[in-house]
Amino acid sequence: MSFTPQLPPVAKLEQKTVIDLVANGKRIDDRAADSYRPLHIQVGLIEKANGSAQVSLGKSKVLVGIKIETGTPFPDTPDEGVLTVNAELGPLASPLFETGPPSEQAIELARVIDRGIRESKAVDMKSLVLLKGKKVQVVFVDIYILDHDGNLIDAASIAALAALASAKLLKAELKGDEVVYKPGLHPLPLNNHPVAVTFAKVGKTIVVDPVLEEEQVMNARLTVTIEKNGNICAMQKGGLSGFTQDELKAVVHLAVQKAAENRAKILAAAKG
Amino acid sequence: MSFTPQLPPVAKLEQKTVIDLVANGKRIDDRAADSYRPLHIQVGLIEKANGSAQVSLGKSKVLVGIKIETGTPFPDTPDEGVLTVNAELGPLASPLFETGPPSEQAIELARVIDRGIRESKAVDMKSLVLLKGKKVQVVFVDIYILDHDGNLIDAASIAALAALASAKLLKAELKGDEVVYKPGLHPLPLNNHPVAVTFAKVGKTIVVDPVLEEEQVMNARLTVTIEKNGNICAMQKGGLSGFTQDELKAVVHLAVQKAAENRAKILAAAKG
Amino acid sequence: MSFTPQLPPVAKLEQKTVIDLVANGKRIDDRAADSYRPLHIQVGLIEKANGSAQVSLGKSKVLVGIKIETGTPFPDTPDEGVLTVNAELGPLASPLFETGPPSEQAIELARVIDRGIRESKAVDMKSLVLLKGKKVQVVFVDIYILDHDGNLIDAASIAALAALASAKLLKAELKGDEVVYKPGLHPLPLNNHPVAVTFAKVGKTIVVDPVLEEEQVMNARLTVTIEKNGNICAMQKGGLSGFTQDELKAVVHLAVQKAAENRAKILAAAKG
Amino acid sequence: MPEPKQPEKLIDDKGVRIDGRRLDQLRPIKLEVGILDKADGSAYIEQGKNKILVGVYGPREAHPKHIALPDRAVLRCRYRMAPFSVDERKNPAPSRREMELSKVIRESLESVVLTDLYPRTTIDVFIEVLQSDGGSRCAGITAASLALADAGIPMRELVAACAVGKIQGHMALDLSDAEDKYGEADLPVAWVPNANLVTLLQMDGILTTNEFEKGLTMALDACKTIHGMQQEALKKKYLVIKEVAEEREETEVVA
Amino acid sequence: MPEPKQPEKLIDDKGVRIDGRRLDQLRPIKLEVGILDKADGSAYIEQGKNKILVGVYGPREAHPKHIALPDRAVLRCRYRMAPFSVDERKNPAPSRREMELSKVIRESLESVVLTDLYPRTTIDVFIEVLQSDGGSRCAGITAASLALADAGIPMRELVAACAVGKIQGHMALDLSDAEDKYGEADLPVAWVPNANLVTLLQMDGILTTNEFEKGLTMALDACKTIHGMQQEALKKKYLVIKEVAEEREETEVVA
Amino acid sequence: MPEPKQPEKLIDDKGVRIDGRRLDQLRPIKLEVGILDKADGSAYIEQGKNKILVGVYGPREAHPKHIALPDRAVLRCRYRMAPFSVDERKNPAPSRREMELSKVIRESLESVVLTDLYPRTTIDVFIEVLQSDGGSRCAGITAASLALADAGIPMRELVAACAVGKIQGHMALDLSDAEDKYGEADLPVAWVPNANLVTLLQMDGILTTNEFEKGLTMALDACKTIHGMQQEALKKKYLVIKEVAEEREETEVVA
């Protein structure tokens, strides 16, 4: 059951400061409404993973690891591999996070990232089949939040794409019942590069890449995921209030632009 | 672990009224001790299910859906299909119900209904085998409580039988490893028609089909499930006290009569 | 998540008595520092199990049952059977134990017993294979604590070895896909006889086989499991403080001696 | 039950959809208010083959207490699919999809409920999908608004919801199951008409920005229509109550 | 371990059952009281190959507190089968069957315990089936009564329990595992003799109403016998205690 | 990813291990302190291919309250492996191994933290193994000590930890993954140097008592070395802080 969350007791005064700044075209960390925080992307840190990327977005920090293993396809898609996205919002990353099974926030995060990858057909799922209906490769995308200073969705989306774009796998073949790996690493075939761009409505103003203090006072949140051709491939609204029709139109257009900028950085970092 | 339940704080006065009425041969809703509340049965509401029935017993309301799917038989009964009964006593139906895994009340309800169906051999389990020991049809009976005003066992038993009796399935066959469905719907083969009849002992009097207010003051509860030939196929006593030997004999005889009356209504409704 | 346990409110005075006694070379139950409580071992109580043993160590009482069933080997050990050790520290045995999933104490206990058996290669795992990589015998060691008066690890270790050493199984063979049992019971092949010996450091003194009152005031605990040739095959330190290097050396040597004494009793009891 | 087969075309040469609808046409909608006895408020919706029951309890004491908020009621929401509501039986354990939808549906309702009137309480919305046919989260929101109103919980206004999608390259209103499954995109929308706020918005599939804008307009128009139906359903309920009350009065006069 | 094979006949031509019993004969019963150290009360029963241990704790402070009742003790009961107690190893996770039996066993004991003497506390009954052989819920109740008495918890009287069943068309007392498995019906009964109340009654299989009445009478007769054994077991325990006390007294006198 | 193949030999004819180390040589260790923003204290360790991040929160209010202790802080510890940290993906659900290690790691730290200064609070240590390469519990303890210090939690001294093992019949320091897997024994040790207390000790495999004594000495020597590195890492962190502070001061003077 989902219920209205208990926000941490941020002093009213502090909240007012954040809102007033935004209303005056400023932000608590001196950015413009349409600017991202500094973005750093590092791939390949986890040698035991097929792919990995650590992303810092300001002080938010996310690690994504990709593991590729053999498994069974879903009965209704016998000729496709399997993609699984999982997110850990562990207590290391924030006093707001607790131990225990995935919270609704973790599930929402994982499912939004999953939709962007799946709907844009980023991973070439046909190429993952070893034996139709019986044996396929399963791509696990594990999102690990290390430090939470706001806008985890974009940080995770960027890290997931960087990890996928830099992932390598051994060519697997079936010999009888057994999976045999041939030497030599090949890149994971990607057909698309989805990038999530998240906005917060603070007061009446919309800002991109909200920092934690902005998330704690925002009326609503919107994530727009854009694929490589500039089309939308996933959206998700969050927060207790909403957006007007005009706001939505404006936000979508800005998302296309911001996604292109971030995509370029991701692909450059993934190439190393 | 099972523990003495916390009953809702019904006013002592109200409790006394219910008990006094029954002691005087009356009931809070003006019924005779051996009368059921009005019974309405509607089958086929859920087109996506193989069978379904919605039952109102007074203000109690239960929906049962039947799904039939292919699965694996149990190792010790390789030549029989599988029957699974599950009950949801969700928070929609009563302030007494909570979210979370099935309560002991839900488990007891499902198991009593299950026993009635299983012990009377109502479903022809042999007819559900596709390949002995390997592949059979699995009959899922899902009981969904919508409104709880007492005597959920009988309402669920009636709905389960109506749903089974009106269930239709495609003929399935094995072609090699795969299940192939042939066109044309066939009724699910039933060999018996078990009907549960539930009694409550209020003060020293025994009433049939207790309403919620009666359940909250009863000393004990007894369910007797009667199959089509008038034999007993399941019993379950509940509640903090018990019954005398003479009371049990009387109750069993009344159950035979009441089950026959309700069975006629169920089969009429199922034929629709 | 593991956290500092809440010890029961033993009166300070009582705690002091236990500590003072040990400091003066005595113990609350009049034993020497290096003496075990009376040990009773009874095998074969549970006829439905392949092996079983009930052990009393003073007032601590443990029952272990062995079940041997067919199953699937782990992918990385296709030519070995499977060994599973599970422990129940149920609420019957102590007011300190609660219902619910296994506590960290139960998990630690099971894993320490498991390590002793596994690392000493006590069970001949190769002999349990029916069809390499496909079908093997699985040995379940279920530890059931009945009365907790301290040193459950040693009581469980003794009971586990006695149960394994007295276990019998039917010879199983594969005929096609099915497991067929041949008549006649054979002993479970054992190659080694690991025995755990547990010490507690109370004040500055180390005692063997701590009773519950000693466990509740001990600084630290050490279990040393010794295999039949006098080598160490498992160790586990517990408790909030630690041991000096010299203490560890002394303890290990004492463990070798105590294990040999207990092993003789176990094997005598297992032979019956 | 085996799933229905994929239709050859989702739109025929005349622009007609598999169930006979035009691209901008809603499925038949049936709304009922106040149909459960124990719940404080309830509503039932049929939209196409969707059959959804919503029960509301509250404001009531928060349980467990630590979730209570000092300055407002906690809104709680559970979206749940019956095991028999879909083609392949759904496992009764809550799925990740159900948990996500419970969250976004709750967020779609938060802004209209006057929660600050009832601090330290909960208002509970239970959405039971008895049969699912595409667009069930939107139909659930439409019915949940009515159930909240039926429970007498003060609201700024009703929330209406409807999905729009893309099939065979065209934007189409209120996708059915088959259209959702074999179509190219799905865009569920909830709207609070007077505040002019979109309080639920999700999307999957591929849409150009133009298609998005067109689809959003179609969805909001449909929400307007549905909002009218909601008001009708409430009026009808109160009318019935009024009539019953009047009948009683007459009876009493007679007696 | 592979299950034992199905016997050809459950009753031979002379009316004798596979374990040599007559139709109305109980299996050998062994009762022991006060055998655990930490539990406040305990008892052990062997009935056929059933081996069941019961421990009782309480009255003690309710934990968690919110389950406490203001006017009586909460009775808590857990029926549990050891993984090695049955032919095929039982998964240690609680099964639906164990949860149901915990409930009906608790309800069979509620009316004899004077719970109103200990408001806001719990009385906990833990039934551990170490080996199961048909009729374990009844044997568990018989032992639980003794364990409650051993814990010094005030009770109106002891509850005795026994099952009756139908094998090869005949009503037979106290079915063993094989009889339960290959028989036609099982009817477990718990009885409070002086109050003349049947406090546990379940049935599965097929019985005519006449068979039910006959079976019930057989079960109640057996409960009477078992009730006698329970009283003997308690007496023996107290005798032992008395003897120990007397011995001590003597020793003290000597000393 | 498929697991690496078993090496033919773990030690070559010259006594050199597969990664080029001598028997008594540690793997390269890199320590960083204070690298997380939200945690009250944090540290990062690389030891061989181990990559482990530790965050510490506290002392903070105990939640849930009933775990609080009246006379000291509760130390809480969670050891966790990321799904991608090992050759075969680890299921995210907590394993029995993780639960056991959380306990023994907590117990290795309890005696150095001055918990009696903060009654009714918790001090939380979260150890996240991002990549695992043998000896991760020891590396985790080494980093956890630093993270506790970084959080400003008063400690008697730092705990250092290192494993020793047996490969091809020789005792060898600080086993790597392959050595652990194909070796004969593993002996993880945590040491509190000034109190001279071994606060973590586990063993699996086969060791003679002589081998144990030799191994223990090797492990404690290594702990001494690591203890020095820990102090360096803390000094470096405070130096940086001091420099930043001085820079700021200068800037302020300039401004």
Image (cartoon, coloured by chain):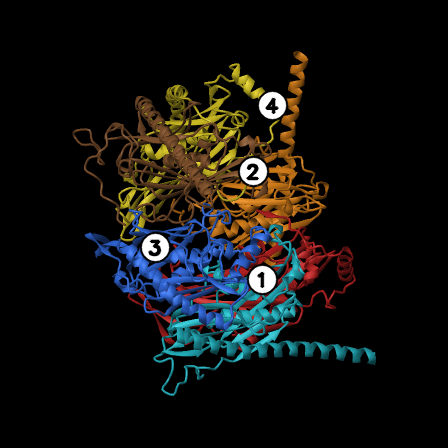
Chain colours: A blue, B red, C yellow, D cyan, E orange, F brown
- Element at label 4: helix
- Callout 3–callout 4 Cβ contact below 8 Å: no
Tags 2 and 1 in contact by the CB under 8 Å rule?
A: no
Q: What is the count of numbered marks?
A: 4
Label 2 is placed on what type of residue? Thr
Q: Which residue is mark 1?
A: B225
**Residue extending furthest left?**
F13
Give whichever of A224, D185 is nearer the camera: A224
From the image, state whether disc 3 or disc 4 is nearer to you: 3
Q: Residues within 10 Å of mark 3 (few under 14, many from 20)?
A: many
**Residue drawn 65% across the image and 70% down it:** D150
Q: Which part of the image, by quadrant, shows the C terminus of chain C?
A: top left
Provide the chain ID for the residue under circle 3: A
Return the residue at label 2: F121
Res A108 → quadrant? bottom left
Residue C81: quarter of image: top left
Residue type, numbered disc 4? Glu
Q: Which callout, 4 or 1, points to the residue nearer the camera?
A: 4
Cα distance in 3D space between marks 4 and 1: 59 Å
Could you tell me how far apart the alpha carbons at marks 2 and 3 are, in whole angstroms? 38 Å
As helix, strand or loop, the secondary structure at mark 1 comes to strand
